[in-house]
Image (spheres, rainbow, N blue to C red):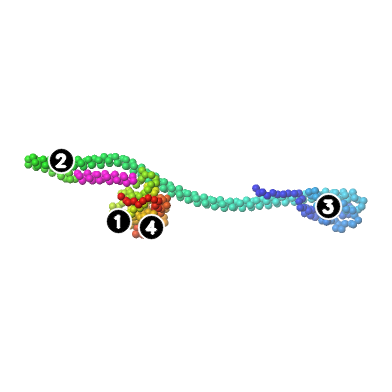
Amino acid sequence: MSDKKITFVVGADKKLKDILAEADVLPLLRGALNAGARGAAITDDGGKPLWALPKDPPADSIAFKVPFLLEGEPVGYMVVRGDKGTEDFIRGIAGLVHKTLSAVLNTNLKRMLATELHTSVVNLSHDELLDVNAKLRVSEAKYRELAEQLEKKVNERTEELKKAHIRLLQQEKMVSIGQLAAGIAHEVNNPLGFIISNLNSMSKYVERLKEMLSFYQACLQRGASAEAQRAALDKQRELKMDFILSDAAELIGQSLSGADRVKKIVSDLKAFSHVDETTVAPIDVNREIEKTLNVLTHEIPSSARIVRDFEPVPFVHGNAALLCQVFLNVIQNALQVRQDGLVLAISTRSTADGIVIRITDNGPGIPTAIRDRIFDPFFTTKDVGKGTGMGLAVAYDIIAAYHGVVRLEDASPGTGASFLIILPVEGGQHVKVR
């Protein structure tokens, strides 16, 4: 609602000339003359004639005036003239015409005021509507701006939630791997322990058997007949004891080596997942790369050559499992670029910018047209079912969370690809890979 008010005072600033029209007055003035009056006129409040019949009334006539009142104030007069001795008659004509004109005056005034009131209300409503419309336009512009900002924020939050969801999935994946590794370690280490123990015992037993056979052979040579010695030698050859004794040690050694390899695989898998470690801890980057390579042993082509160029680097403080996930994703992509003659070079350096890790392959490189998209979620050049397009996207998000940088340094077609990872160093000392 507007705070404007319509102020209405009956007859305010109205003159007779504004209210009465000539068509209202002249017929009544003529009627007064026809009734016997010598003259009839309407004057303003100062006595100036507004309408008069005749224009020059007789000078010897007498005049009778009756005021027209608005809001109790005279705004003009009804003047009727007549002959002397007819005062009552003239007074009656003046009263009659005055009453009639007063009725006309009030009717016209009401009509005028009603028209003005209606006009004022209409104008006021129109102004209010214009004002409301202007405010609505301003509000609409603000709401449109807010809607655009809200949509932008929703899109940003959606992207953040999508990335957070991806990171959460990767963390859950690492936790699942860790739990699986812990289960495997528990289930495998027990039988593996007694297998290794038994093989060690068997190795000792074989040595004793060899010693015992040597003792029997010595006894036969000292006290047995030539025929008994010949029979023992024939049996020894028949049973291939020489071969068995020489091969037994090698078989046991190979078995122990295989058991140790199984134990190391389980240990590497468990170490890679960091299931037993706290979320944030000092990380030896070189050792984590080695663990990742050990886990990926089954994916490394037999003809591939891994070139390690590790320098002592400071510790990085963070979640080692997530950092291993980065190395796994980048190295796994490099291992898949070619099957024959693959050369994968991995180097680490300590610089003023932090720890610089460079992973380079001699694959076909990355086409220029897609270089800007390789870190986009779900983008992949692999066949359907062979890649999710999340490896580099997850690596990018994890390194960004460490306030680091991961980028494609070089990928000229035919010359391979080189990825650069830079991790800021918050503290720690240089360590050597053992």
Q: Answer few, some or many: residues within 10 Å of disc 1's Cα (few below 14, many 20 plus, some between 14 and 19).
A: few
- Which is the main secondary structure of the residues drawn in magenta? helix
Does residue 10 appear to the left or right of 125 in the view shown?
A: right
Of callouts 2 and 3, the N-terminal one: 3
Find disc 1 in the rendering and name its residue.
341
Residue at the left extreme, as displayed: 226
- The type of residue carrying mark 3 is Tyr
Q: CA distance from mark 2 to mark 1?
A: 52 Å
Picture quarter containing residue 181? Answer: top left
Q: Residue at x 20, y 41 (%)?
A: 204
Q: CA distance from mark 4 to mark 3?
A: 106 Å
Of callouts 4 and 3, the N-terminal one: 3
Of callouts 1 and 3, the N-terminal one: 3
Q: Residue at x 19, y 40 (%)?
A: 205
Find disc 2 in the rendering and name its residue.
212
- Check residue 166 for magenta coloring: no
Residue 338 visible at all:
no
Q: CA distance from mark 1 to mark 3?
A: 125 Å
Which-is-in-front pick, marks 1 and 4? 4
Q: Residue at x 62, y 51 (%)?
A: 132
Does residue 298 appear to the left or right of 78 in the view shown?
A: left
**Percent coordinates x, y for residue 33 in the rendering:** 87, 53
- The type of residue carrying mark 2 is Met
Instruction: Identify the disc placed on residue 112.
Output: none
**Which secondary structure lies at badge 2?**
helix
Given contact means CB atoms under 8 Å apart, are the residues at marks 2 and 1 in contact?
A: no
Find disc 4 in the rendering and name its residue.
409
- The type of residue carrying mark 1 is Gly
**In the rendered image, the vertical position of residue 363 relative to residue 103, given as above or below:** below
**Which secondary structure lies at badge 3?**
strand
